[in-house]
Image: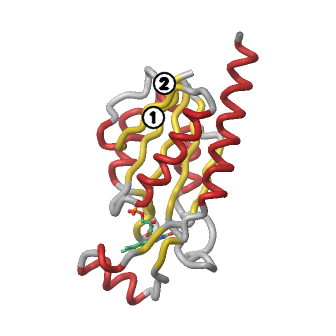
Amino acid sequence: MNVLIAFASKHGSTGEIARIIAQDLENAGLSVELREAGEVDAVDEFDAVILGSSIYVGQWQKDALTLIDRTEAQLRDRQVWLFSSGPVGADPFPAGEPPITSELIERTGANEHQSFTGKLDRATLGFGERLITGVTRAPEGDFRDWDAIRAWAAYIARTLKSDLATTR
Ligand SMILES: Cc1cc2nc3c(=O)[nH]c(=O)nc-3n(C[C@H](O)[C@H](O)[C@H](O)COP(=O)(O)O)c2cc1C
């Protein structure tokens, strides 16, 4: 069972989420490849794909979206899970699912989409980003919920391993 974990991360925090998911799946005995979304041309060598992106102004990163453009038909033939890293704050802001979620689930045939709280470090932001986060009063800090992330990874590992057991 080969699993691809592909991610698009502008300031690195989504990449760190992807890395933890990759480690946990590997520890569960799965064969895992971790790649930046922009470096993935095809997914046909994988049995399952986990694709994640940070959210900027309601949108997934371009690299994650163009990966779907390139591989949509292949994705629909495999087990796919999607995740976003975005809302920030103890009371996550903005609340609710990212607007693009249902379209992405439909296009990829994903089992589900999971939203994780992210990280905002104003010191790493460009001028425009600082302006937007200032106007929207986005809270600064690292709000990533590692327990929730690892619980999701464990659920995916269980699902893939039970698939494997039934196909043997
Ligand atoms: C300019 C800007 C716009 C953002 N817009 C959104 C948004 O619309 N929705 C959201 O949930 N998070 C938004 N965020 C929060 C980021 O998604 C969050 O900081 C994420 O963890 C960044 O991930 P990265 O380090 O992988 O790029 C925004 C952050 C910035 C800097």
Per the model, the C-alpha gap separating discs 1 and 2 is: 14 Å
Q: Residue at x 25, y 75 (%)?
A: 126
Instruction: Reply above or below: 124 against 99.
Output: below
Q: Indicate left or right for 129 with 6 as reference.
A: left
Asked where in the image residue 97 lies, by quadrant, the reply is bottom right
Tell me the crowding category of disc 1: few under 14, some 14 to 19, or many 20 or more residues within 10 angstroms, Cα based: some
Residue nearest the observer in this picture, 44 or 145: 145
Q: Residue at x 55, y 30 (%)?
A: 48
Q: Earlier in the sequence, mark 1 or mark 2?
A: 2
Q: Indicate left or right for 125 with 55 as reference.
A: left
Q: Secondary structure at mark 1?
A: helix
Q: Residue at x 57, y 21 (%)?
A: 1
Q: Amino acid at mark 1?
A: Glu
Residue nearest the observer in this picture, 155 or 76: 155
Asked which colour scheme the image uses, the reply is secondary structure
| Image location (x, y in percent) of residue 142 | 49, 72
Tell me the crowding category of disc 2: few under 14, some 14 to 19, or many 20 or more residues within 10 angstroms, Cα based: some
The picture quadrant for ligand 1 comes to: bottom left
| Image location (x, y in percent) of residue 88 | 52, 74
Q: Amino acid at mark 2?
A: Phe
| Image location (x, y in percent) of residue 42 | 37, 28
Residue denoted by label 2 = 46
Q: Secondary structure at mark 2?
A: loop
Mark 1 vs mark 2: give the one in front.
2
The quarter of the rendered structure image containing the C terminus is top right
| Residue sitting farthest toward the front | 27
Residue denoted by label 1 = 72
Q: Residue at x 61, y 50 (%)?
A: 113
Q: Is mark 2 within 8 Å of ligand 1?
A: no
